[in-house]
Image (tube, rainbow, N blue to C red):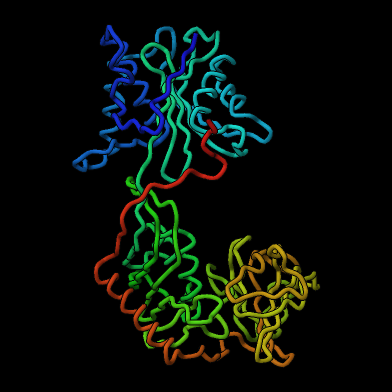
Amino acid sequence: MLKTELAPEGVVDFRGPMAQFDPRRQPMRLAPHAFTAAAAVTVALLAGRVYQPVQAEEAPPLTAEQIAVLETQAFAAAAAPAGLTVPEAIPVQIRKGETFEQAVRRTGIAAEEASAVAATISNAFDLKDLRAGLRFETAISKPRGGTGPARLIGLTMRTGPASQLTVSRSFDGALRLRSLDEKVTQETMVLKGDVDRSLLATAQRMGATSKVTRRAVQLFSHKFDMQRDIRAADEFTLVFDRAVTESGRTVETGELLYAELRGQVFYRFKAAGAKEAQYFDATGKNTRSALMRTPLQSFRRVSSGFGVRTHPISGYRKMHQGTDFAAATGTPVVAPADGVVVEARRWGGYGNWLRIRHANGLESGYGHLSRYASGIRAGQRVSQGQIVAYVGSTGASTGPHLHYEIWRGGQRINPSGIRTTEGTILAGADLAAFRAEKTRIDRIIAAGGEKKPAVLQASAPGLRPAQG
C-alpha cells in the first residue's frame, strides 16, 4: 500500500537532490538508496531545472555537459526500477473541467496511485482551485512487458515565479513532498550592444523582454525609420527594471527607464500632476513628436512611394497617393499619433480600410488590411503607438503590404514630407526633479546596473496554501 510522508511544517528541506529522503530508517542498503538518488535527479532534470541547495559558499551553476554526466551516473548506479523502463518525462496540462487527479491519471498510472499523489500535494496546497492550463512535469516508468499500470517516479509543479513543489518516491515506496524556493532579486539592468540585423532581435537575444523592446522601438520610431535609418553596428543602450531568480530567470519586467540609439536619448520621467510618465531628452524636452515616422515597426521594404507610377494591376500610369510598405500578413499597424477612428470598413480596391483623424487637420489612412485590432471601430479614440490593425492583401492587391496615406485638409499629401513639432519642455520644480532622476539613471549606467536585496516570492495565483 502506498504511504505518504511530509516534511515538518514550515521547514523547507534543502538537502541536495542526491540526499537520502529519511536517514533514520534502518537498515540502509546501497542499491535502494542509489535508486532514490536517481529518481530525485531524474525528476529535477526532466523538469528542465536543477535547484541548488542553500550553501554558505556560492557554487557555480552546472553546465549542460555536467548535468548529462550526473544523469548518466545516477542511472548507471541505480538502473531502472525492477520490471519497469527507465523513467521518461511526461508533461501534463490540466484541461478545462479536469481535476488534478484526473490529469495525473493520463500519464498511465493507476487510480490508487494518482489519488495518493493528489493527497500528498494537498498537504501543501488546495488543489480545488487549480486552473485549466496549469502545466507540470512527471517522471514515469512503464512496465517492460507493456501491460499493467505505469509507476510515478516523481512530479514537479511550479507554484510561483520562483518556487515549486516536488513529489519523489523514497526508497521504501513512500511519496515525499518537498518545497523548493529561489530568492528573487530586484535589479536595474543595463544592456549595451551593437545592432545586428534589427534592434528588436538583438535586444531580445541579449536578455530584454518583448515588453521592453516594443517600448524602445516605439520611442525610436519618433526619430528614425527603423527599417531604413538603422544600420548594423549602430550602438544602443537600454535600461530597465526586472525581477530575476537565483538561476538567472527573469520573472517580471518593469518599465523602460532609458533608451539610446545613434545619439538620441530617452529618459523616463513622471512630472507632478501628470497622469502617466513620459520620455524626455537630456535637456528635459519631451521627445514625443506629433507624428511617428512610419506606422509599422517592422517591414521588408518600401515597395512603392508617393508619386506617378505604373499601376501593378491595371498597367496604366497614374498617381500613387500614398506609400506602400511590403510586410508579412499579420504585421501590426500602429497609430502614428493620438486620434479618433473615422472609418473602419471595406472600401473598393483598398479592401479593409481604416482612417484616423488627428490634431492639426491631419488624417491617416490604411488600406489592404487583413483585420482590425480588437475594439477598433468608428468613434473609438486611439493613442500614439497603439496597435490598430494588421497588414494583409485585401482589395486590389498583388501581395501582402500596407498602403499608407496622410491627408491634410481633405487632400492627400506625401507622408515623407510631414514636418511636425516636438513636445513641451520641463521647467521649475519639474525640471529639478527630472535632473535628479537623470543623475540617478546616469549613475546606474556608469555602474553597469544596480541590484537590491533578494527576497522570497509568494505563490502564484491559482494555488493557495491548504487550510489546516
Q: Residue at x 70, y 75 (%)?
A: 381
Q: Is residue 346 above or below residue 133?
A: below
Q: Quadrant of residue 401?
A: bottom right
- Depth order, front residue of 214/41: 41
Residue 99 image position (x, y, % from top left): 63, 29
Q: Residue at x 65, y 91 (%)?
A: 360
- Depth order, front residue of 144/136: 136
- Depth order, front residue of 196/93: 93
Q: Residue at x 48, y 43 (%)?
A: 459
Q: Residue at x 45, y 89 (%)?
A: 426
Seen as rendered, the residue at the extreme left is 57
Tell me: 392 left or right of 242.
right
Residue 190 image position (x, y, % from top left): 32, 65
Q: Is residue 30 above or below residue 374?
A: above
Q: Quadrant of residue 464?
A: top right
- Depth order, front residue of 410/441: 441
Seen as rendered, the residue at the extreme front is 468
Q: Is residue 101 above or below residue 337?
A: above
Residue 171 image position (x, y, % from top left): 36, 13
Do we see residue 105 in this rendering?
A: yes
Q: Is residue 228 above or below residue 207?
A: below
Tell me: 83 left or right of 125.
left
> How many marks on residues?
0
Residue 316 image position (x, y, % from top left): 73, 80
Do we see residue 393 in this rendering?
A: no
Tell me: 458 left or right of 103.
left
